Amino acid sequence: MSTYHAPLQDMHFVLKELAGLEQVGRLPGFEDATPDTVAAILDEAAKFATEVLDPLNAVGDREGATWNADGSVKTPTGFKDAYRRFAENGWNGLTKNPDHGGQGLPQLVATAVEEMWQSANLAFALCPLLTQGAIEALELVGSDTLKSKFLPKMVEGVWTGTMNLTEPQAGSDLAAVRTRAVPQPDSSYKLYGQKIFITYGEQDYTDNIVHLVLGRTPTAPEGVKGISLFVVPKFLVNDDGTLGERNDVHCVSIEHKLGIHASPTAVLAYGDRGGAVGYLVGEENRGLEYMFIMMNMARFSVGLEGVGIAERAYQRALAYAKDRVQGRAPGLEKLAANATILQHPDVRRMLLTMKAQTEAMRVLAYVTGAAIDNARRHPDADARKRHQAFVDLMIPIVKGWSTETAQEVTYLGVQVHGGMGFIEETGAAQHYRDARITTIYEGTTAIQANDLIGRKTARDSGAVARSVVADIGKTASALANDSNEDLRTIGSDLAAAAGALSEAIDWVVPAFGKETRAAHAASVPYLRLWGLVAGGWQLARGAQIAARRLTEGAGDAAFYHGKIATARFYAECLLPQAPALARTITHSDAVLALADEQF
């Protein structure tokens, strides 16, 4: 089977030319993120991904995590040692506050590194992903006592963190959360309830696990306004930082899943033996607000899972196509009787589709990562506000569109392999299975789409959405008037797609208030349209820069020609879907009426 190799050349191109790494490195507090330092970090991350994580991916799929009758969980062979090395190498604290032992690097840098973890071993990468979210919540709203007690060990990776939202009766409806939190005389709480689908809710990597748990106090109002957030450690922590007695939170089972077998998905019981000790995070009844701190970045990270697993599926399919000999390629009959399948036109189409979609997802995610850094650190308040508005719009798109597109890419990966893609030994099937959860994690695609049409589009009457479309239009106009034929074609196709997106926005804004059901029926096509056009926009920007570098005679000419070719393929073969999606959106009332007749 093929070996994962981080696409460092493309990553560096995106970081430098499209996401503005040097500008991000000049933001207050990011001065250490020089191009040389970042290059060294990416080189080391690539080595760890290739040499440590990638070889364990198939092992984890075959063995899976196993639950024991005493409530413990055993992770697959090699995973515990890999996590130890991961933590010792400092990867867990890449972006975290130096006051708690972190390295304080930009999100943009972590975005590239995180993509490598997701590509090499998605099941492994889920553990630090959840820990990052828990750290983020405690850093922003935790008390000084909670920060000093938990953050240093979590940032170091000595302890991991989880996010506990879902309950058997509630699913995504957090208003239905029933976990009880009873106040105690010492200001702690006793928690009682059950949580399901808790990623790495139990594991053998670390001595302690810090659960962030949603629950209700006795005086809490009904609905989402009555939810509070609590820290509930697996082991209580003494004042001197050592571990105390076992807390009353136990793993009563783990799920048997379609994919990500190495990642234990736990059912956790709180309070079966007297009550689980927890500590309130922030203020009572503001738990959902705080949890969204974790969830927003988790959604961004899940979008990166889509990017990472798509890249891995593409690499595996390309390697197979270069090696697999079968038949005569149509139109090339004069060549060797047995050509590799890479010479077959449809295989080339599939591979180029995989490549173009993956690169579009990557650029959109990295540009959003840079905007996160600017929203947090830019010295100008107005600039921070603009960048935050862009981030807010893009997060559901990065999450929803990238994970949906990863389904298509991993599907094509199986198809390129032909019959061998259906056979587990090639590895293509694992990517297809592992990718499937990503459209569900941290809110399904419909949940992301509902957020996009409501809070991110209709709430401000489409102002931010239209401003981004205007930027897309400027790029399209500049390209359409370029002397380069490739760029003119890209610009023309991008302009048509931007027009379709603008039409969709004009429909969504009034429909959200007047035709609520139709607007929600249109939400997922609207999200897909946004991702399709925004991805094409970023590839077009890359083609524009690549053409400039070719004119200057600088860098790797073959690489730059490839960027232009990929962008043109995307523009001519994928962007034409935009008007069709726009039509689906603007006719959603009719579609809904037809559906109502059927169901």
Image: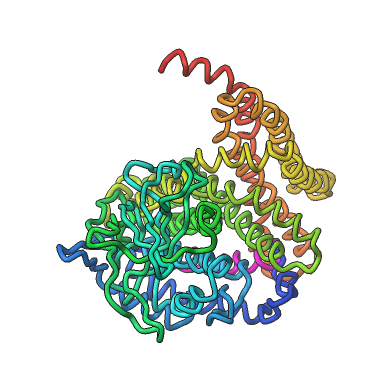
The N terminus lies in which quarter of the figure? bottom left
In the image, residue 120 sits, relative to residue 206, either above or below, namely above
The one of 169 and 415 positioned closer to us in this rendering: 169
Q: Is residue 225 visible?
A: yes
Q: Is residue 325 visible?
A: no
Residue 14 is covered by the magenta coloring: yes
What residue do we see at 72% from left, 42% from top? 465
- Provide the residue span drawn in magenta: 3-18
Residue with the most extreme bottom position: 240
Q: Position of residue 454 (x, y in %)?
A: 62, 37
| Residue that appears at 60% across and 70% down | 109
Q: Residue at 25% across / 51% down in the picture?
A: 256
Q: Main secondary structure of the magenta part?
A: helix
Measured as percent of width and height from the top left, residue 446 is found at 50, 38
Question: Between 576 and 560, which is closer to the camera in this rendering?
Answer: 576
Tell me, yes or no, whether the highlighted magenta stretch contains residue 469: no
